[in-house]
Image: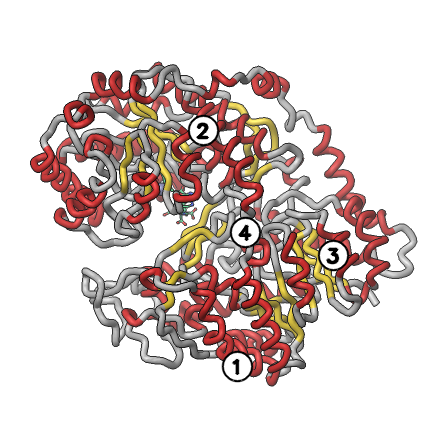
């Protein structure tokens, strides 16, 4: 008997972003529903075939999604809020997309209650999937929530694969994680309490799967790597006991990932399941405990190939570690697998034509990771004389990487060693800085600004693409970008914004753009990873010590500032976000890599100051998402994350105003850290929660200035003046007027100018109206 190889999920976007293009064409009315479904079916077929070709024995189905697997689960069990007009039975595609993206009167499904301001419905809330840059659609439950199996899509996928000759293992999001990730409408109850009502729908689904010949299902319960309370543990017990008693013939592989199962291991092992998957990349030390405590008949899926990063696995080392342990448990009850779904890594390294070949030899994308699993399994084949020979290439790559001069830069190491506490402290406290900045900037009460980016129009993207292909000269590309920047600056002046931005037209992405300019960073051409829906990113790769060979944004900032007498914000992506949204080297602690980036950014910040830029924004939208999943690890992370931000921000004088920006954040539990960042101004996302998020800032008396977002940029809707006035008035409940800035929730790159223009005109009017009712002096208001 040989050891089996398994995969937990494959990227669905297509190696040439086929899904994105089909979706966007469908939404634009350029292709029919069937055309979209055909593209989806073709991608599934290709993915199954590719996994089989790479030697994977246990291939997943139902890992595909047109938008998001959590939304799929909501739709599967009929958790469709009443506003979308669903009347039971299968949920049609337009309702599905209305939940994902919102709808207007003309695009909403029949039966929609038209509860949204445009006669359609707002989208469901979107938030980060654990500690990844993937966003899921937050399920929403009412207190009289009922569930029903609307359409057995997992069964359809299983049969579709079977017709193509693949016997697959369907993947489901587990009921406990599903409920835990959801929110209670009006926050009125604990969503876990819905478990008893939810289970019949799941049981019916599983029964139908079993009746169709499904032997194994993979049920993902990543909530098992979180700190769970007693109710959640009871819900887990109830769930898996119910499944075992109602569908005893069905074997369940319970999958956990993104961290250590830790204190939840005894609970997991007490469940009547047939298999358990653990993430042995994030938490390798679990292996011994697992093998010592797991019942002999339990199938163990060992997540040994990193599903969250793209370094080649040290297969020889892994083999040496696994071999004795595996033989003890019995090889017929072992599966080798990636640590988690491969959704979070790019698909195919072979598509990269421009990567340094040495670096490329250290990497593995999704397909190459499957090769690694097959190779590893081959080493375990009985009768193989010299198993380690199988790994010759992997060993050579690991050795080369260890000693490569590309990785180690003594200058960077030296700078890091010389860091002192003073490097992460501004010259004076906030009160002093505030006075100096007030004198320099002379802003009115409720100053208006935006978060940085303006629409990345198809024209802007096309110009960049033509330039990359060599079809548009650098000079012409630059001239075009300057013209776009100038138009944006003139327009902001015209509508009366106080602190301007240059618009970020020159940037492909807020992380990749900097990654392309820093040493120690590499970037891909086709390494796309889904961020949400049809929006993808190409996370750069940090392979070596990071430094900044040249200024990165100073030319653009000074050009933009030269066009106007108003303050122009310099715009940078902060060290924690640069770390969090990149693939990070695994041979140094993340805290050290982050300090290296912080020092590089610090140089950029001081260069901007020297060039006369008075306001500099250092974005940290990923600070919250980087928070460890377990409470016990959080303070250590926050300590270095905040220190890194402060290193990047503290090289400037008191009269230079430092802004930061965060979106998608639950601030309550990290308020102390946010205050410790000591940015002069922070802009945050608050409009979707109708300023509820501000509670954290007022209750804890946040001392510095705040721009609570008044305009939800995730929706095409144009907010009215009144609506924004009302939101700011609400903010003045807990904040003093002199603390408040007026800005959107986030950057405007995904919006169209047709939406942005009227929205910002309204925003400026809202600020003006507020000045009338609160008086116009900031200094007076601050001293009052
Ligand atoms: N890294 C990162 N993570 C983030 C965010 C973010 O901005 N960056 N924001 C939050 C939300 N997430 C987002 C993620 C992606 C996008 C996004 O807009 N992505 C774009 C791609 C951005 C990009 O890299 N653009 C490149 C490449 C564009 C492209 O596809 N070009 C075409 C050619 C274009 C043409 O000829 O018309 C091609 O290569 O084929 C560029 O502008 O240069 C997309 O999927 O469409 C938005 C938000 C959280 N996480
Ligand atoms: C995801 S946060 C985005 C911040 C960036 N400055 C922008 O405006 O796009
Ligand atoms: Zn943002």
Asked where in the image residue 314 lies, by quadrant, the reply is top right
Q: Position of residue 655 (x, y in %)?
A: 30, 17
Identify the residue shown where x is 65% and y is 43%. 311
- State the residue lying farthest toward the left: 772
How many tags in the picture?
A: 4
Asked where in the image residue 88 lies, by quadrant, the reply is bottom left
Q: Position of residue 435 (x, y in %)?
A: 25, 18
- SS class, disc 3: helix
Please report whichever mark, 3 or 2, sits nearer to the chain's N-terminal start.
Answer: 3
Q: Which is more toward the observer, 464 or 299?
A: 299
Identify the residue shown where x is 46% and y is 79%. 149
Q: Position of residue 11 (x, y in %)?
A: 54, 57
Q: Which mark is residue 290?
A: 3
Please report whichever mark, 1 or 2, sits nearer to the chain's N-terminal start.
Answer: 1
Asked where in the image residue 6 lies, by quadrant, the reply is bottom right
Q: Which residue is mark 4?
A: 344
Q: Do the residues bearing badges 4 and 1 touch, measured as CB atoms within 8 Å? A: no
Q: CA distance from mark 3 to mark 1?
A: 32 Å
Classify 223 as above or below 452: below
Please report whichever mark, 3 or 1, sits nearer to the chain's N-terminal start.
Answer: 1
- SS class, disc 1: helix
Q: Which mark is residue 445?
A: none
Q: Mark 4 or mark 1, which is nearer to you?
A: 1
- SS class, disc 4: helix
Q: How many other residues sit within 10 Å of disc 4, few (<14), some (14-19) or many (≥20)? A: many
Q: Is any part of residue 556 visible from this angle?
A: no
Q: Which residue is mark 1?
A: 204
- SS class, disc 2: helix
């Amino acid at each position: 008997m040989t050891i089996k190889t398994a995969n937990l999920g494959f990227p669905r976007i297509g190696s040439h972003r086929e899904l994105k293009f089909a979706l966007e064409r469908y939404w634009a009315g350029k292709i029919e529903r069937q055309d979209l479904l055909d593209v989806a079916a073709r991608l599934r077929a290709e993915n199954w075939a590719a996994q089989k070709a790479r030697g994977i024995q246990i291939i997943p189905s139902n890992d595909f999604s047109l938008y998001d697997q959590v939304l799929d689960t909501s739709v599967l069990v009929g958790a469709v809020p009443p506003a979308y007009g669903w009347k039971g039975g299968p949920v049609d595609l337009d309702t599905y997309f209305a939940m994902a993206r919102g709808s207007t009167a003309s695009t909403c499904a029949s039966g929609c209650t038209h509860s949204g301001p445009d006669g359609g419905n707002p989208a469901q809330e979107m938030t980060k999937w654990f500690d990844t840059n993937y966003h899921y659609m937050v399920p929403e439950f009412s207190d009289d929530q009922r569930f029903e199996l609307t359409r057995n899509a997992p069964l359809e996928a299983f049969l579709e694969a079977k017709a193509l000759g693949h016997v697959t293992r369907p993947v489901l999001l587990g009921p406990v994680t599903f409920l835990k990730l959801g929110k209670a409408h009006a926050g009125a109850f604990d969503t876990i309490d819905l478990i008893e009502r939810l289970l019949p729908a799941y049981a019916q689904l599983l029964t139908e799967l079993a009746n169709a010949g499904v032997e194994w299902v993979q049920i993902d319960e990543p909530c098992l790597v979180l700190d769970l309370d007693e109710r959640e543990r009871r819900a887990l017990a109830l769930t898996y006991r119910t499944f075992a008693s109602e569908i005893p013939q069905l074997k369940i592989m319970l999958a956990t990932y993104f961290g250590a199962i830790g204190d939840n291991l005894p609970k997991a092992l007490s469940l009547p399941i047939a298999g358990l998957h653990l993430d042995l990349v994030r938490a390798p030390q679990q292996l011994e405990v697992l093998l010592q405590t797991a019942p002999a008949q339990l199938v163990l899926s060992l997540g040994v190939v990193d599903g969250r990063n793209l370094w080649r696995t040290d297969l020889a080392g892994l083999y040496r570690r696994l071999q004795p342990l595996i033989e003890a448990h019995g090889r017929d009850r072992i599966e080798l697998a990636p640590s988690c779904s491969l959704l979070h890594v790019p698909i195919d390294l072979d598509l990269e034509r421009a990567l340094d070949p040495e670096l490329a030899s250290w990497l593995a994308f999704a397909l190459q990771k499957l090769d690694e699993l097959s190779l590893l399994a081959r080493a375990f084949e009985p009768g193989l004389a010299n198993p380690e020979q199988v790994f010759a290439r992997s060993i050579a790559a690991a050795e080369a990487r260890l000693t490569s001069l590309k990785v180690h830069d003594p200058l960077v190491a030296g700078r890091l060693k010389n860091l002192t506490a003073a490097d992460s402290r501004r010259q004076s406290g906030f009160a002093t800085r505030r006075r100096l900045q007030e004198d320099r900037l002379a802003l009115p009460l409720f100053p208006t600004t935006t978060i940085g980016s303006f629409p990345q129009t198809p024209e802007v993207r096309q110009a960049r693409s033509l330039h990359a292909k060599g079809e548009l000269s650098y000079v012409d590309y630059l001239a075009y970008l300057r013209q776009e920047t100038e138009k944006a600056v003139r327009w902001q002046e015209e509508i009366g914004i106080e602190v301007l931005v240059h618009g970020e037209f020159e940037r492909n992405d807020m992380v990749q753009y900097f990654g392309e300019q820093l040493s120690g960073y590499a970037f891909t051409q086709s390494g796309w990873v889904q961020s949400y829906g049809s929006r993808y990113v190409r996370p750069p790769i940090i392979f070596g010590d990071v430094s900044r060979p040249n200024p990165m944004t100073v030319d653009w900032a000074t050009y933009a500032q030269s066009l106007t007498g108003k303050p122009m914000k310099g715009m940078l992506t902060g060290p924690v976000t640069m770390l969090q949204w990149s693939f990070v080297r695994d041979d140094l602690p993340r805290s050290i890599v982050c300090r290296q980036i912080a020092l590089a950014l610090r140089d950029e910040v001081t260069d901007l100051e020297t060039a006369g830029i008075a306001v500099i924004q250092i974005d940290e939208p990923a600070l919250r998402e980087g928070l460890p999943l377990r409470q016990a690890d959080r303070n250590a992370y926050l300590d270095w994350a905040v220190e890194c931000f402060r290193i990047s921000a503290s090289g400037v004088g008191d009269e230079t105003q430092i802004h930061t920006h965060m979106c998608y954040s639950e601030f309550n539990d990290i308020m102390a850290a946010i205050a410790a960042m000591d940015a002069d101004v922070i802009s945050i996302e608050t409009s979707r929660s109708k300023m509820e998020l501000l509670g954290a800032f007022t209750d804890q008396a946040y001392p510095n200035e705040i721009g609570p977002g008044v305009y939800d940029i995730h929706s095409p809707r144009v907010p009215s003046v009144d609506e924004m006035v009302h939101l700011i008035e609400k903010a003045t409940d807990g904040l003093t007027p002199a603390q408040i800035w007026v800005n959107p929730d986030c950057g405007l790159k995904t919006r169209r100018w047709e939406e942005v223009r009227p929205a910002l005109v309204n925003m400026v009017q809202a600020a003006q109206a507020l000045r009338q009712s609160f008086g116009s002096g900031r200094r007076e208001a601050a001293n009052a």
